[in-house]
Image: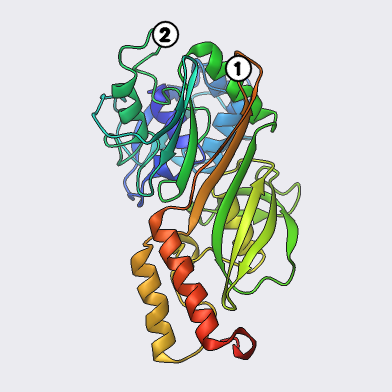
Amino acid sequence: MLDDIQDFLEEDDELAGDSLQDEKFEHYRFVADKGQSLLRIDKFLSDRIEGISRNRIQQAADAGCILVNGIAVKSSYKVKPLDVITIVMDRPRRELEILPEDIPLNIVYEDDDLMVVNKPPGMVVHPGHGNYTGTLVNAIAFYLKYEHGMDMTDPRLGLVHRIDKDTSGLLLIAKTPDAKTDLSAQFFNKTTKRRYVALVWGNMADDEGTVTGNIGRDPKDRMLMRVFADGEQGKPAVTHYKVLERFGYVTLVQCELETGRTHQIRVHMKQIGHTLFNDERYGGNEVLRGTHFAKYKQFVYNCFTICPRQCLHAQTLGFVHPRTGKEMFFESELPQDMQEVISRWRIYTIQTQNSHLKPL
C-alpha cells in the first residue's frame, strides 16, 4: 500500500521499530513490456505508483527495497524489456487504521487552530512498524474525534513535526487543514524556533559552537543515522550549541536547530565526540568519560537507571500563529528523570572537586 511505502521511507526511527526482520515482503510488482525502452527505474516507478515522488523511490532504492529480477538496484538502473521489478519491505502489507485511544495528553496550549502538547519520554509519535497503538496520534485521534475537518484515517493526524520516541518535550499539532498547511510551511522554511536541552558525554572545549554536516541513513545499518561529507549523500543539517553547565565528565548543553533531520542532535553531538548521555543507539549507554573506579561506574549506571533513555528534551517552541499572525513561544521544564540525573552530576562534581577530575 502507498501508506506502507511512505511510512517505510520516512526518516524516523519510530516508524522502523527497534529491530529489522531478515524476511522481506513484496508490496509492488511490475513486469516491463516487451517493447520497453531503456528508462531509469525511479522514473518508471513514479509513473506507475500514484502519489509517490521520484525522491521517495530513490530513497527506497538506497535502502535496498527495489529489486529487479530479484536483485537490489540503484535508482539509476535502466529498466529493460521483461524486467520484473518489485518493491519489498520488512513487514507485510497492511491498512494503517488510526484507532482513537483514550490516552492522557499534557496540553500546554490550545485554541481553534492548534494545540501544543508536552510529550513524555517513551511515547511514539505516530503509528508505524511495531507501534500501531499507544502513540501520540492515537491519543490525538481520540481527543479531536469531534472536530470538523480532521481526517481520522490520516496516519499523521495533525502533526507538523516530530521528535523521537525517547525524547521528551513540546510538539505542535494542527487542528485544521489550513493550520496544518501554514505551520508545515513554517517548519519547511526554517522560521520556527526550537531549542533542546541535552546532557552529553565529555567536557566541551568551547562554550558555544555550530555543527554542520549532511545527515543520512548509515548504509550499513538503516536504524542509524550518520554524518556524510558535503555532497556525498544525506541532507544538510545545522545545529548550534551552547554550554549551560559543566560537570567534568559530562556537559549540559542547549541545542538550537536550523534544520530538522532525523536524530540530528544525537548524530551531530556524536560527530564532535560528545555522544548524548545514555543514548543506547549511538553508544552513549557506556561509561565514555570518567575514572576507572568501581564506585564511579556504579554512580553512572545508577544515573542510567534513573533516566533510561537519551537525555534530550525539546524545551522551547516558537512559531507564528497561522490565523492571527501573532508570534507564539512556549517553554517546558525538564522532565523529572533528567532533573534528577543533572542534580546528581552537580552534587558529584562538587564532591569530587572539578579541578582534580582526570579523564578516563
**Residue tagged by mark 2?**
149
Tell me which label, 1 or 2, sits earlier in the chain.
2
- Viewer-closest of 72 and 210: 210
- Viewer-closest of 208 and 46: 208
Residue at point 61%, 46% (across, down):
195
* Residue 72 in sight here: yes
- How many numbered callouts? 2
Residue type highlighted by circle 1: Pro
**Residue 52 image position (x, y, % from top left):** 53, 21
**Residue 129 image position (x, y, % from top left):** 34, 39
For residue 252, above or below residue 59: below
For residue 332, above or below residue 39: below
- Viewer-closest of 25 and 352: 352
Query: What number is the disc on residue 322?
Result: 1
For residue 22, above or below residue 180: below
Quarter of the figure with the N terminus: top left
**Residue 354 image position (x, y, % from top left):** 61, 84
Q: Quadrant of residue 246?
A: bottom right
Residue type highlighted by circle 2: Gly
